[in-house]
Image (tube, rainbow, N blue to C red):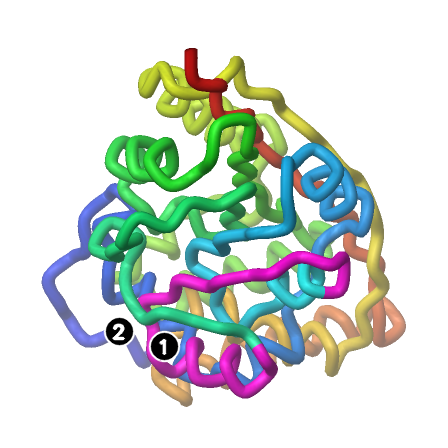
Amino acid sequence: MPTLPREQPEPAQPHQARQTAESFGTDAQRYDQARPGYPDGLVARIVAGSPGPDVLDVGCGTGIAARQFQAAGCAVLGIEPDARMADLAQARGLQVEVATFEAWEPTGRMFDALIAAQSWHWVDPVAGAVKAAQVVRPNGRLAIFGHVFEPPAEVAEPFAAAYRRVAPDSPFSNQPARRPLEMYQAGYAKIADKIRETEQFNDPEQWRFDWEQSYTRDQWLDLLPTTGGLTRLRPDQLAEILGAVGRAIDALGGRFTMHYTTLATTAVRASTP
């Protein structure tokens, strides 16, 4: 039975797990093509609630969210620690500086909005909130958001069983097949607490957008390897997991509908006295 090679375990805090955080560029092209975008209503609400068009995208990846903000008329600068992801974003027309947000040098630049799409958990929650306050203009908006998506039990449970079988030493193998939305909402509430602690923002708001997307077997098997638990597996391990998931989707008729919830924690930078 294949298992992960024994390595030093990564820290429990996501922002300290740099090997996983910087593993998504392994197949940046697949990531860009397979990962879903963000609700148009979310983008429109952030743009409407910002005082101008200058947007900083923290952990921009391949530019999925950034391109939506560009299409809405914004001028976007991306910050991305993985040069492979940054290269693809730049090839798609995004200006990107390669750095972690904590180490990035703003050199006096300030922005009307700072967004973090599916990336803030890789940022130190205390240092990130403090730095956001330094680079968001007074009355500008900080918006941290991401998707919550759990496949139906008929797909999630065979995935979890296969993962435990092929990678029992991975910390991801101990996770339940499906996790409640409340767990993710609690995470966004903690983000709001760190923003409040800076005393530089008005009281944070929690936004929620619910939507659905249908996936064929091939579409889901294309997206699955871009998720954090799979980016560091060996090819044989990945193949065994994808085989189990593919058979589960075949049993559902070759496709299923995913229920997405996009959560956001957002706050306006307090105006100067």
The image quarter containing residue 254 is bottom right
Q: Nearer the viewer, mark 2 or mark 1?
A: 1
* Residue in the foreground of this view, choosing between 147 and 152: 147
26 to the left or right of 91: left
**Quadrant housing the C terminus:** top left
Q: Secondary structure at mark 1?
A: loop
Q: Position of residue 187 (x, y in %)?
A: 46, 30
Q: Residue at x 52, y 13 (%)?
A: 203
Residue behind mark 2: 4
Q: Is residue 255 above or below residue 265?
A: below
Residue 166: in sight, yes or no?
A: no
Q: Residue furthest front?
A: 273
Residue behind mark 1: 233
Q: Magenta segment range?
A: 71-93
The amino acid type of the residue labelled 1 equals Leu
Q: Is residue 16 above or below residue 210?
A: below
Q: Residue at x 52, y 35 (%)?
A: 142
How crowded is the residue under tag 2: few (<14 C-alpha within 10 Å), some, or many (20+)?
some
Q: Residue at x 43, y 54 (%)?
A: 58
Residue 87 painted magenta: yes
Q: Residue at x 39, y 45 (%)?
A: 121
Residue 146 painted magenta: no
